[in-house]
Amino acid sequence: MSKDIIFTINSECLDEHYQPSESTRVTTNFANLARGERRQANLRNALKMVNNRFNALAHWDNPNGDRYAVELDIVSVDMDIANNGHAFPAIEILKTTILDHHTNKRIQGIVGNNFSSYVRDYDFSVWLLEHNKHQPQFSIPKNFGELHGKLFQCFVNSSDYKAHFNKPPVICLSVSDSKVYRQTDNQHPILGTEYLANEASLTEQYFQQMGLQVRYFMPPNSVAPLAFYFFGDLLNDYTHLELISTISTMETFQKIYRPEIYNANSVAGKCYQPNLKNADHSVTQIVYDREERSQLANEQGKFAEEHFIKPYQTELAQWLAQ
């Protein structure tokens, strides 16, 4: 089946006029912002936050803090696994492009950043919940995340991916509130201070199935570390500006979505455990419906089950057995 998978890659500009498509997961950060009466103000303010953060980090030869702007594109990946013309919306990621106003050059950023997947919704909101229903102790199903991981790696290694992007993806997520992170002596000029987790989270294990490793860094003037998932060598495979484009974009989303962690009024110490009940934080002026996001994840998982997992159950099982 892997030889027959056809990936169709489409791109759409994420600006203040963005309207989510019907196939977009409505729990995606950018789709959540682009809804309701304040949708345009939400998007405009979020993009302004991204640009301000970028210029603060890229401060060299930038005395007025306005040299750069970040352009965001939503990359949607549809997958036809049977080569029968019926494509399933597999993945949505973000691609950054940096506009240098001094040179009028457009600089390629990083692809990945945000990560959205219907199959992941199925794994966490349907399969994992069903597996643990009425069980006295939480456990992870056998082969949990294997299908999703293999599909993702198939995409990243495909000729379709390589035709569109010149470097592997980097995905940036929030840290887990159930883990403890300890500061190390390792410092990077852009990524900042590295932290180590006391143990692997379920998300980390899941992303390992996707072929990704993780490192945790707290960038300069941030208040909490971010989780960077990547292939290869994060610190040397990407330029400073590329890394800044990811930090500025994803830290902005996290400040909006998880202000208790990323907009806290105190900075993470040498030993840090995130707290989603932290009252000592500031909120942005951007409207984000967190309750709706959690409710809809289950619906999206069932959508994947109905339109992908069950219809192609035999083909997927054979492919995994290879």
Image (cartoon, rainbow, N blue to C red):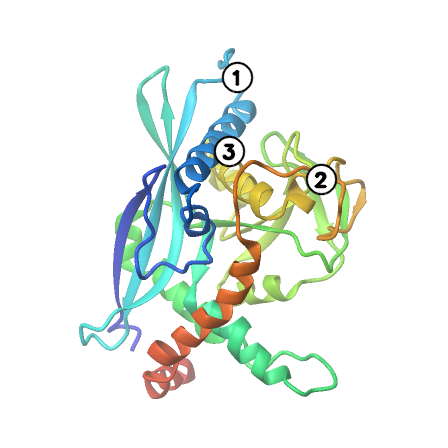
Q: CA distance from mark 3 to mark 2?
A: 24 Å
Disc number lying in front (3 or 2)? 2
The residue under label 2 is which amino acid type?
A: His
The residue under label 1 is which amino acid type?
A: Trp
Label 3 sits on residue: 244
Q: Nearer the viewer, residue 79 or 49?
A: 49
Q: Nearer the viewer, residue 179 or 20?
A: 20
Q: Nearer the viewer, residue 313 or 279?
A: 279
Residue at the spot 67% in from the left edge and 80% down from the top edge: 139
Badge 2 crowding class, 10 Å Cα cut-off, few under 14, some 14 to 19, many 20 or more, is some
Point out residue 74 in the picture as x, y percentages from the top left corner.
35, 48
The residue under label 3 is which amino acid type?
A: Ile
Disc number lying in front (1 or 2)? 2
**Location of residue 143 (image quadrant):** bottom right
Label 2 sits on residue: 281
Numbered badge on residue 60: 1
Task: Tell whether label 2 touches label 1 (CB within 8 Å).
Answer: no
Residue at the spot 48% in from the left edge and 41% down from the top edge: 237
Q: Which mark sits nearer the N-terminus, 1 or 2?
A: 1
Q: Quadrant of the C terminus?
A: bottom left
Q: Is residue 218 above or below residue 119?
A: above
Badge 1 crowding class, 10 Å Cα cut-off, few under 14, some 14 to 19, many 20 or more, is few
Residue at the spot 65% in from the left edge and 42% down from the top edge: 262
Left or right of 296 on screen, residue 73: left
Point out residue 47 in the picture as x, y percentages from the top left corner.
44, 34
Point out residue 30 in the picture as x, y percentages from the top left corner.
43, 48
